Amino acid sequence: MQPIFGTTQLRSIPAHNEGSGQRSYDPIVEQRSIGELEVSEVGLGCNNFGTRIDQERTDEVFAACLDAGINFFDTADVYGSGASEEMLGRAIKGHRDQIIIATKFGLRDMDPGLTGGSAEWVRRSVDRSLRRLETDWIDLFQLHTPDDEVPERETLEALHELVVAGKVREIGCSNYDANRLDSAADVAKRDLLTPYRTVQNRYSLLHREPEAEIFDVCNEHSIAFLPFFPLESGLLTGKVGVKGPRPGTRLAEWPQDRLDLFIDERKLLIVSKLVEWLRHRDRTLLELAFSWLLIRPEIPSVIAGATSADQVLANSLAAGWQLSAVELAEVDDILSNS
């Protein structure tokens, strides 16, 4: 199955070294299209910048991304209260033309009297993000959450102005359901406005809600789907055992009410079955989590966070598994019958 948004580079493919029994990898990841953007099929979520790691570690993670062929960096104005954008801006100096920056606005901390999708907040947000990122343009500017206080047309008009002005190349949204995404696409088409090129919603092996409706809308309007929580905040990395998250992991730092969004008995059962299934295939849960998502033609990139160069490399290599039809059917059986 070929991605509907196209590909431009070879996938990272595992190979066996003769006599060693070990796999080696070419760390160059494939690229796929989002509108006029060419993004690596593995992207970096930058929510750790300014929160879990400092500028020195941020620079190391960014350099590791370039080495691995990762060019797609997703941040937001609320990550670290702006620190994520600032640290990414410092890290990218000298490399701006090599990378694709996506950032988000409109989730919280709006100026008094404004809401996330209001035209004035769109304009203020982009200028503030441009300053923090120390760049002249943003490649993908995304509304972080729907705004029920203003008409969709107001938000789209303001975003269209940014595209015309050259401050933004493509626009996207996040946390939209199928009806709202379809309606926004119709508004853009009717009024000759720049359409949303992406929607960023939760989707993973363990959270398959988008399959019901939203992928149909994506295909109808040529909207790329960017999954967030593709690793379920670590549950799909093998770092969570039957007793819960291991100390030092992201999940271990969360309060119980947030932890309950990701861990329950059914999900732990599914993970244990997948781990057992993988044991006979010399594959990891991380490889399955990435490659299973990238099988979908609607998904151009899987964005995951990293706090070290080793995690960046592991993520870049994880996308290299081409699952067979038989393997996909077996995985689906585990997911559907657990």
Image: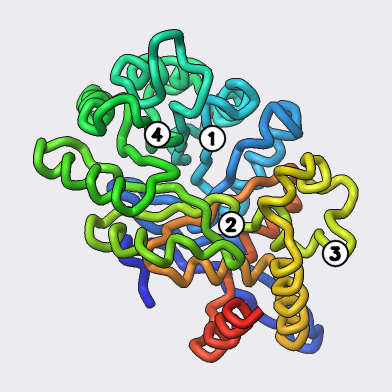
Q: Which mark is residue 121?
A: none
Residue in the image at 39% along x and 10% along y: 113
Disc marking residue 75: 1
Looking at the rendered structure, the secondary structure element under dot 2 is loop
Quarter holding residue 48: top right
**Closest to the observer, 145 or 43:** 145
Where does the image place residue 153, in percent across and percent down from the top left? 21, 31
> Mark 4: which secondary structure?
strand
Name the residue rendered at 85%, 64% in the picture.
241
Within 10 Å of disc 2 (Cα), the crowding (few <14, some 14-19, many 20+) is: many
Q: Which of marks 2 and 1 is nearer the N terminus?
A: 1
Label 3 or label 1, whichever lies nearer to me, is 3
> Which tag, 2 or 3, sits closer to the chain's start?
2
Q: Distance between the residues labelled 3 and 4?
A: 35 Å
Residue at the far top in the pictured view = 112
| Residue at x-position 70% and y-position 67% | 267
Q: In which quarter of the image is the C terminus?
A: bottom right
Q: Name the residue under label 2.
A: 230
- Image location (x, y in percent) of residue 36: 29, 47
Q: Which of marks 2 and 4 precedes in the sequence?
A: 4
Q: Mark 3 points at which residue?
A: 241
